[in-house]
Amino acid sequence: MIVLGIETATPVCGVALADGDGCIAETRLRGGTRHGERLGRAVEALLRDAGLSANQVDGVAVSIGPGSYTGLRIGLGFAKGFVWAQNKPLAAVPTMDAMAASVPVLAPALCVLIRSGKSEAYQGMYRGEEGRWTASQPPSVVGQKDAGKGCPGGATVFIGDAAPLFEEDVRRNVEDARILPREFSVPSGLSVALKGMDMLRTGAGADVDSLVPMYLKRFQGVE
């Protein structure tokens, strides 16, 4: 199975192709609000460089949020157009699940913090079970001063672009917080593709017509 992964929830636009052996090809472009300009060209170039045509892709996985309102709409719109045109299945991958899946389970708990405005973050909590991360509660929106609250403490790993920015508050709220380096701060098209592949193999495809992003809060004009 060859899966195209699309990640546009953050300022980094990520696309990747993966199969049962792992990564075929991957591209990341830091474009801020330019995802709409770059996503189509990035996918076209990725397929060309991999020597594949669009109809050789067996399914598409798209990051569904939480994250940038505009980015999520762009990514989902492109993914829907691709699967409609090629008659392929679509996997809706929660952004935080894809990020968590890219981190080895070397601690009892993990917390994902994605920026959601100047002093807020989307927060997701996971516990390590049988070599994988399992969500321990639904994602939520937290203020900077509350970042990390609710984590069990004791060697909780933190990833996401808000983790280093809110480090002082995180360390005040969570004993022995372990904040990973910046390379873990954004999700990737590859992690979305691999997570989506697992979903498609088990028949957990999305209903393309009704699928909408996971926003968590109302759009206020500034992301």
Image: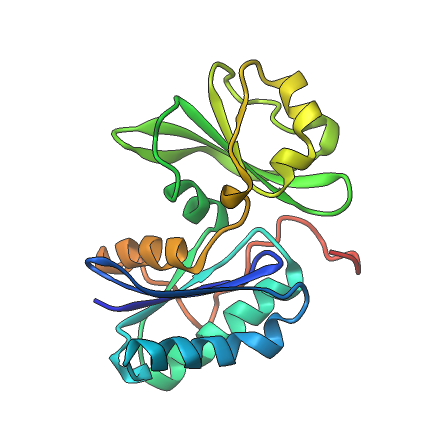
Q: Is residue 116 left or right of residue 35?
A: right
Is 70 drawn above or below residue 128 in the view shown? below
Q: Is residue 44 left or right of residue 50?
A: right
- Where residue 132 sits, quadrant-wise, is top left
- Residue 198 image position (x, y, % from top left): 27, 54
Is 32 drawn above or below residue 50 in the view shown? above
Q: Residue at x 66, y 40 (%)?
A: 121
- Residue 95 image position (x, y, % from top left): 49, 51
Q: Is residue 60 left or right of residue 222?
A: left
Q: Residue at x 25, y 80 (%)?
A: 56
- Residue 128 image position (x, y, % from top left): 35, 28
- Where residue 200 sits, quadrant-wise, is bottom left
For the N terminus, the image quarter is bottom left
For the C terminus, the image quarter is bottom right
Q: Is residue 94 left or right of residue 48?
A: right
Q: Residue at x 60, y 70 (%)?
A: 35
